[in-house]
Image (cartoon, helix red, strand yellow):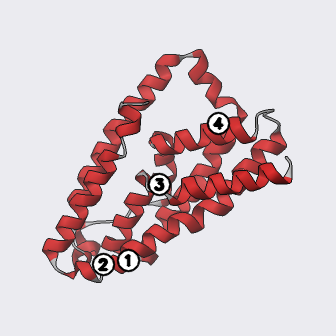
Amino acid sequence: MTYDILMALIVFAFVTSITPGPNNLMLMASGANFGFRRSIPHMLGIGLGFTVMVLLVGAGLVQVFYRYPISHTALKIVSVVYLLYLAWKIAHAAPAKGAEASGVPMTFLQAAAFQWVNPKAWAMALTATTAYAPNQTLYAILLVALVFGAVNLPSVSTWTVLGQQMARVLTNPRRLVAFNWTMAALLIASLYPVLWPH
């Protein structure tokens, strides 16, 4: 991989990791409801889970979609249903003071597993492996995965910090409820490219 391609990959990884999507919206809500420290497993699950996903997609999992198109449709249905469920959970999240008793942030394994039903993660992994590792060599796929691993975690952490800082404004229960419902609505809106592709 040339220096120019590597720089382009780093920019692609940063832009796709830092822009709004299901992971970042959920981390923002988690930061606001549970704080940064309790959201660390969620952040690590995204970072490592997506890195593993890129490796497996690059190693040939994408061929399953080409060979069995119904599997892509099934994944899309599962993704939509699960994101709607997560939106409902965010909308009904407990206020920060009651979080210990009545709510918990997403765990490491839940966040890692979520990557497999996250439409944005699939789009990122498929684009990255086809555009930046077109020859599909193990070296190229590992490099793409490592770049995403290095760029993704600091990027998604930004959203958790943003949510945590917003918690200062969300001390009023009504504001927190409005915030959670807004995050849930935005999460549902993130399904638009999946349900109505260009």
Residue 109 seen anywhere in this rendered image of the structure: yes
On residue 111, the disc is 3
Tell me, yes or no, whether the two marked residues, 3 and 4, touch with CB atoms within 8 Å.
no
Q: Nearer the viewer, mark 3 or mark 2?
A: 2
The local secondary structure at tag 4 comes to helix
Residue 136 falls left or right of residue 95: right
Q: Which numbered disc, 3 or 2, marks the residue that appears first in the sequence?
A: 3
Q: Which numbered disc, 1 or 4, marks the residue that appears first in the sequence?
A: 4
Badge 2: few (under 14), some or many (20 or more) residues near its Cα, within 10 Å?
A: many
What residue is at 57 percent from the left and 23 percent from the top? 65
Tell me, yes or no, whether the two marked residues, 3 and 2, touch with CB atoms within 8 Å.
no
The x and y percentages for residue 131 are 70, 38
The quarter of the rendered structure image containing the C terminus is top left
Residue 106 seen anywhere in this rendered image of the structure: no
Which residue position holds label 2?
167
Q: Is residue 104 above or below residue 13?
A: below
Q: For the residues marked 3 and 2, what is the alpha-carbon distance in whole angstroms?
A: 22 Å
What's the amino acid at mark 2? Ala
Which residue position holds label 4?
57
Q: Which numbered disc, 3 or 1, marks the residue that appears first in the sequence?
A: 3
What's the amino acid at mark 1? Gln
The local secondary structure at tag 2 comes to loop
Q: Which numbered disc, 3 or 4, marks the residue that appears first in the sequence?
A: 4
What's the amino acid at mark 4? Val
Residue 160 falls left or right of residue 64: left
Q: For the residues marked 3 and 4, what is the alpha-carbon distance in whole angstroms?
A: 18 Å
What residue is at 55 percent from the left and 16 percent from the top? 68
Badge 3: few (under 14), some or many (20 or more) residues near its Cα, within 10 Å?
A: many
* Frontmost residue, 135 versus 31: 135
